[in-house]
Amino acid sequence: MQHSDFQIGTQFYTESGLWRCTDVGSRTIVAVQVQDGYPGPTEAPPFVDAVEVVFDEYDFPGLSREPVAD
């Protein structure tokens, strides 16, 4: 994926599972991992127990719209 593919709410996958974008910066995105449906698509930061993670241009090639195969 590329930086231009992201907006707040975009869902994507890494090897560790499903993530949802919570912020888009000029060169980075911030996302939370979705686990057991939390956080839901209508929930917004701050989250009770979901940690936001920053992804940068070096991470984008490892992100996918489809689940990553083992």
Image (tube, grey):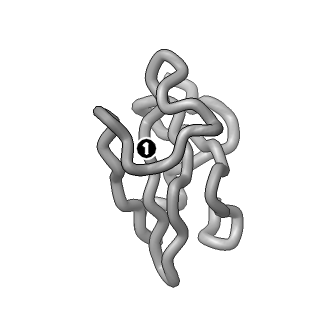
Q: Nearer the viewer, residue 34 or 45?
A: 45
Percent x, y for residue 67? Answer: 61, 30
Q: Residue 48 appears in which quarter of the rendering? A: top left
Q: Is residue 7 above or below residue 52?
A: below
Assess disc 1: are there few (<14), some (14-19) or many (≥20) residues with their C-alpha within 10 Å of its C-alpha: many
Hey, which quadrant is residue 43 in on the image? top right
Q: Which residue is mark 1?
A: 32
Q: Position of residue 33 (x, y in %)?
A: 43, 36
What amino acid type should be assigned to the residue bearing mark 1?
A: Val
Residue 36: give x, y in percent of width and height.
48, 16
Viewer-closest of 56 and 58: 56
In the image, residue 29 sits, relative to residue 12, either above or below, namely: below
As drawn, 33 above or below 45 = above
Q: Residue at x 62, y 45 (%)?
A: 64
Residue drawn at x 36%, y 60% as measured from the top left: 54
Provide residue 38's location: percent of width, then percent of height.
48, 26
User: In the depicted view, which residue is nearer to us: 6 or 68?
Assistant: 6
Q: Which element is circle 1 on? A: strand
Residue 34 located left or right of residue 48: right
Q: Residue furthest bottom?
A: 26
Q: Please tell me whether residue 18 is drawn above or below residue 32 in the rendered image.
A: above
Q: Quadrant of the N terminus?
A: bottom right
Total number of numbered discs in the rendering:
1
Seen at 65% across and 62% down, the residue is 6
Q: Residue furthest top?
A: 36
